[in-house]
Image (cartoon, rainbow, N blue to C red):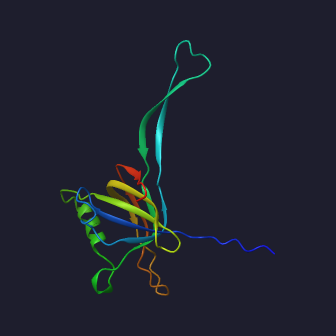
């Protein structure tokens, strides 16, 4: 008799802080999300035809395009008093109003093992701005107050080395 295949799920948390001020300058609490995508870089590869090299092409790296991070079905952990942290919405409101300087965020996405003990991967991004935020469909039966999607445009993404 074969044993059933156990699927291990990983946990991840997202933290955002004011660009250039280090992790102690949190914009708002840590967020938990069900999905994260956009951890990718696309490089333009330029092809050059070189005289005398008739059976191939020379390829050079061009500009790198950064994809926006997409965080789905998430919640910014409650602040004091058990209410959802409204600092996130205040950040968005200041940006929409055009208040200067526009506050950018640096962020960290830390993936933990299934036991939530060790960090197994850590991505960092810099100078992020929210591109799109969509809230939940309010439903009296579920009482959800989570955001459905958060898209963040950024200016750099790295996979940090393990400690």
Q: Out of 145 and 113, give the one closest to the viewer.
A: 113
In percent of width and height, residue 96 lies at 27, 61
Q: Which residue lies furthest to the front in this view?
A: 163
Count up the numbered dots: 0
The answer to whether residue 39 is above or below residue 28 is above
Q: Residue at x 32, y 83 (%)?
A: 83
Q: In this view, does 107 lie to the left or right of 74?
A: left
In percent of width and height, residue 20 lies at 24, 55
Q: Which residue lies furthest to the top in this view?
A: 52
Q: Quadrant of the C terminus?
A: bottom left
The answer to whether residue 85 is above or below residue 35 is below
Q: Is residue 28 left or right of residue 71?
A: left
The answer to whether residue 64 is above or below residue 108 is above
Q: In this view, does 148 lie to the left or right of 155?
A: right
Q: Which residue lies furthest to the left in this view?
A: 100
In percent of width and height, residue 144 lies at 44, 81
Q: Out of 142 and 2, give the one closest to the viewer.
A: 2
Q: Quadrant of the N terminus?
A: bottom right
Q: Out of 43 and 151, give the one closest to the viewer.
A: 43
In percent of width and height, residue 12 lies at 46, 68
Q: Residue at x 40, y 51 (%)?
A: 158
Q: Out of 104 and 115, give the one closest to the viewer.
A: 115
């Amino acid at each position: 008799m074969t044993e059933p295949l156990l699927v291990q799920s990983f946990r991840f948390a997202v933290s955002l802080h004011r660009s250039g001020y280090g992790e102690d300058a949190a914009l708002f609490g840590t967020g938990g999300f069900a999905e994260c995508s956009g951890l990718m870089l696309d490089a333009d590869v330029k092809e050059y035809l070189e005289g005398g090299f008739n059976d191939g092409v020379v390829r050079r790296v061009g500009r790198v395009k950064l994809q926006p991070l997409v965080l789905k079905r998430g919640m910014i952990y409650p602040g004091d008093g058990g209410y959802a942290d409204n600092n996130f919405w205040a950040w968005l409101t200041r940006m929409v109003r055009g208040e200067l300087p526009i506050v950018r965020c640096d962020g960290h996405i830390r993936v933990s093992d299934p036991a939530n003990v060790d960090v197994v991967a850590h991505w960092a991004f810099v100078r992020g701005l929210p591109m799109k935020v969509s809230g939940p469909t309010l439903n009296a039966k579920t009482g959800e107050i989570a955001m459905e999607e958060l898209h963040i445009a950024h200016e750099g993404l790295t996979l940090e080395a393990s400690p």
